[in-house]
Every structure is written in C-alpha cells, then in structure tokens.
Image (spheres, rainbow, N blue to C red):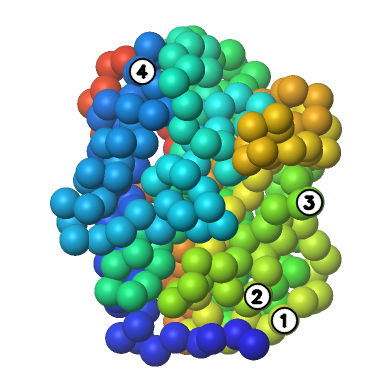
Amino acid sequence: MIHYKTDEQIELIRESCMLVSKTLAHVATILKPGTTGLKIDKEAETFIRDHNAVPGFKGYNGFPGTLCISPNSGVVHGIPTDREFKDDDIISIDCGSYLNEYFGDSAFTFAMPNVSEEVMALLVATNESLYKGIEAAKVGARIGDIGHAIQSYTEARNYTVVRELVGHGIGKNLHEKPEVPNYGRRGNGPKIKKGLVIAIEPMINLGVKNVKQSDDGWTIETKDGKASAHYEHTVAIKEDKTDILSDHSIVVDAIKNNSEIKNISLKK
Ligand code: MG
Ligand code: MG
C-alpha cells in the first residue's frame, strides 16, 4: 500500500532531504581529480552525523558506504573505493539521510574538468529529464506519466533509459510503494494523489539501455561500458503544486565555487 503523508510529515521529510542536499553541496566543495570515493564518503558521513542524523544507505542491505559513488559507466549503487578520480571522470553520487525518523534521498552526477562534450550533453539532458518527470507528477496524473515524460525526452535525444532500477515512494522507509519507473505509457500506473512523496531519479545511458552487476557485487554498470548519468529529487505532491523537497541549487552553487571540477549549466 501507498503511505500518503500529512503536511507535517512532509516538512520532516524536507528537513531530511535538505540535509542530503547540504551533504551533496559539501561534497561539491571537496571533489577534484586525484581524490577518492573513500575520502569523499568519510567526509559525507561526518557531515551527516554532525547534523544529528544517520547516513540513510549505510547498512541498508549491507551497503558499506554513506554515499553510492558510481563513476563513468557506473549507473548506481557504486561502493566508495580508493581509486583516484581522473580528470575526465563523471561521478554519480547518491546520498540518503535518516533524520526525524524520515529518509531523504537525492542524487547528482558531477563532472571533472576534462569530460567530453558528448558526455556533458548526456548530463544536461538527464538533469532536464528529471524536471520533465517532476512536471508530470501532479494530482490527477498517473505514475506512468512521469516515466513517459522522462523516456520521451531522453529517447528523442538518442539516449536510453535503464529499466532495471526505478524511483520509489519514500518516508519512514527508504523504499516505499509505488515504484516510479523512468519509462512508461501515459495514463498507466497508480493515480497520483495529494500527500504522495516520491523520489524521481532518471538513470540515462549514452549507449545501450542494458546494465549488469559489476564484479564488486554492488555497482550496477552499463553493459557496453559507456557513460550513465543520474539525477534525483524527492518531491511531495500537494493539491496545487509539486513541492521539490531536495535542493540542487546549493549543489550547483558549490560547483561554481570549486575551480577543480567542471561548472555545469543545469536546472536546479
Ligand atoms: Mg538516491
Ligand atoms: Mg532513490
């Protein structure tokens, strides 16, 4: 069943999501070529605990990190490692927190300074598709409308949509009903009602849509080894609007102030 949230519960989820956003903004201040996922992960864990919260992913199904760090062909669920980031890497970072007994969830794909124009265009389109999905998420619409918006926007640009991993309801649990696929048909799926809180998270590939489990037992990566991008917001459906509970604007601002990573012109 779907757990619809009250306005008070939505505000508590917002606090958790804002801590996630602040953590991603903090990550954006320290990310650079030569640093490692393990270092970034440690900083993120300290940051979250310093704000009287608990990392939302750590220990979830045995996941070892605070952040999922998935470089280049990594789609999601990458474990932080001691591999040094290269100057042409893209790094997808997914962060969760548990605060006020509610989870927050948001993800962002960062770019190192020498990422190709081709891959930068993938990042921009994936980010854009997130907002197409959010626009479709409103009272009276259906979950399939969200996936349809994301799929049609990205496939029109010759990118592909990962099928095996989807967005989700969120609240007292990290993953709640309903599933929110990034593909779908208009008018299909559960009706979107007031009080629904969902994480919308397009995972979009440069090459084939197919993915595989990597040898580390965690990372999901593209089957053809080409780049994949991932942007995620947690949103609440209100009667008159869709309220974005996480905040990428502070992440984008932090990127602008970090001369060691690429400044991406993205919707916030
Ligand atoms: Mg996430
Ligand atoms: Mg999520």
Marks 2 and 1: in contact by CB < 8 Å? yes
Q: Dot 3 lies on which element? A: loop
Residue underneath mark 3: 163
Q: Position of residue 176 (x, y in %)?
A: 58, 74
Quick one: label 3 or label 4, which is nearer the N terminus? Answer: 4
Residue 123 disc label: none
Residue underneath mark 1: 190
Task: Work out whether residue 185 or residue 96 is closer to the camera in this orientation and state it.
Answer: 96
- Is 24 located above or below residue 264 in the figure? below
**Which residue is depicted at the point 71% across and 32% down?**
214
Tell me if 213 is positioned left or right of 69 in this view: right
Name the amino acid, label 3. Arg
Is residue 73 at least partly visible in the picture?
Answer: yes
For the residues marked 3 and 1, what is the alpha-carbon distance in whole angstroms?
18 Å
- Between marks 2 and 4 in the image, the one whose residue lies nearer the viewer: 4
Q: Dot 4 lies on which element? A: loop
Q: Dot 2 lies on which element? A: strand
Tell me if 125 is positioned left or right of 99 in this view: right
Quick one: label 2 or label 3, which is nearer the N terminus? Answer: 3
For the residues marked 2 and 3, what is the alpha-carbon distance in whole angstroms?
15 Å
Classify mark 3 as within 8 Å of ligand 2 or not, answering yes or no: no
- Between marks 1 and 4 in the image, the one whose residue lies nearer the viewer: 4
For the residues marked 3 and 4, what is the alpha-carbon distance in whole angstroms?
32 Å
**Which residue is depicted at the point 46% across and 10% down?**
87
Task: Work out whether residue 72 or residue 146 is closer to the camera in this orientation and state it.
Answer: 72
Q: Dot 1 lies on which element? A: loop
Residue underneath mark 2: 178
Q: Position of residue 200 (x, y in %)?
A: 57, 60
Marks 1 and 3: in contact by CB < 8 Å? no
Residue underneath mark 4: 35
Classify mark 1 as within 8 Å of ligand 2 or not, answering yes or no: no
- Is 159 located above or below residue 257 in the figure? below
